[in-house]
Image: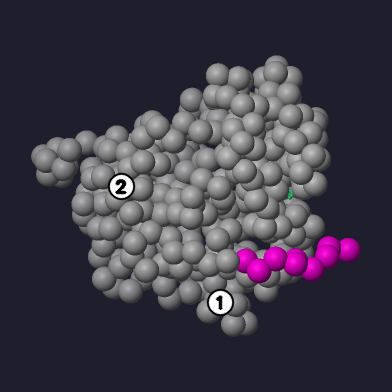
Amino acid sequence: MASAVPVVVPRMKLGSQGLEVSAQGLGCMGMSCAYGERRPEPEMIALLHHAVAAGVTFLDTSDVYGPHTNEILVGKGLQGGVREKVELATKFGSALTDGQWEVRGDPPFVRAACEGSLARLGIDCIDLYYQHRIDNNVPVEITMGELKKLVEEGKVKYVGLSEASASTIRRAHAVHPITAIQLEWSLWSRDVEEDIIPTCRELGIGIVAYSPLGRGFLSSGSKLVDTLREDDFRKILPRFQPENMVKNAAIFEHVSEMAARKGCTPSQLALSWVHHQGNDVCPIPGTTKIENFNDNVRALSLRITPEEMAELESYAAMESIHGDRYASSIYTWKDSETPPLSSWKATT
Ligand code: ATR
């Protein structure tokens, strides 16, 4: 039996435009795709309702999860007065054309994607709408121009970017204020700290940390790879390849040992590390289980001293991580530079 959550979930300001969210969100992707087996829809809706009742009201989805099925699921979870209690974030930016994924940020695509998401979610307005991946054929100013119109029309409240470089963030922010940047940030994914995090802070942009549990590695360690189904997304990620996992295993073992010393779980320690990065950071751990959700919420009450932070970080130095976080075929912020605005006029 899942126990009640004995933690009051604080609220936080995300970005500088007025959005307020729960200080920890809920990543909904795994409820419909990517990880593990599909669990029954009523169970997932019960999990969404449990999260909202516990005070975790910042829900994260995307049109690409499924594709579409995750937004449909979340939309069902929002019915019956739940919508009014949540901050709903979704994303656009990928299209499946002739069996191939394509990154798209052109205005007609952005508009159609937004209308599709609104319909699937059954809502009138998206609280936070992210460009999920940046189309490097379209100047980011052009994409932002369309998002700005969607805000003016009341279809979107706040705008975000995901997997965007510092220079792309600056260019986008000059067209319309960016409320949040979503990025992968965890004890074993820290490449964003050099340039992207300082840029967000300089511009007053909120930071949403996805995969804060290292896609489950910081919760379960290397034994996770033995349990992955053939269609699990992690099967194609370099870090989860057995030859890399063997080398990465020690990271989790140290985290786990330290968690035992502190009387918490490895997941709580990993999440708390993200919370301790600053009050402008909101981690959005994903789960399909109420028990794990409750475990994760309790991370909000964990305190880590600066010495303990340093100890944790010493176990996961960047040079000791084996395997990239994504396969080279997957877009990341490193692929997010877009052409100058002048080139768009020339080609259209
Ligand atoms: P993402 O943001 O990509 O969803 P994540 O939040 O870093 O990634 O990790 C999600 C993974 O961690 C999921 O596989 C989830 O599995 P369950 O659906 O079985 O929970 C796992 N996970 C989340 N919280 C966990 C916990 N407290 N203990 C063990 N595994 C957990």
Residue that label 2 marks: 202
Mark 2 or mark 1: which comes first in sequence? 1
C-alpha span from label 2 to label 1: 31 Å
Amino acid type, residue under disc 2 in the picture? Glu
Q: Residues within 10 Å of mark 2 (few under 14, many from 20)?
A: few
Secondary structure that dominates the magenta span? loop
Occupied quadrant, residue 134: top left
Q: Is residue 8 magenta?
A: yes
**Residue for point 58% across, 40% down:** 306
Q: Which numbered mark, 2 or 1, is in the foreground of this view?
A: 2
**Residue for point 54% across, 72% down:** 86
Q: Nearer the viewer, residue 92 or 316?
A: 316
Disc 1 residue lies near ligand 1 with CB under 8 A:
no
Span shown in magenta:
1-9
- Quick one: SS at disc 1? helix
Whether residue 296 sits left or right of residue 226 in the image: it is: left
* Residue 200 horizontal/vertical position (percent): 35, 47
Q: Nearer the viewer, residue 301 or 34?
A: 301
Please say if 154 is above or below 276. below
Outermost residue, right side: 1
**Residue for point 49% across, 50% down:** 278
Please say if 244 is above or below 127. above
Residue that label 1 marks: 85
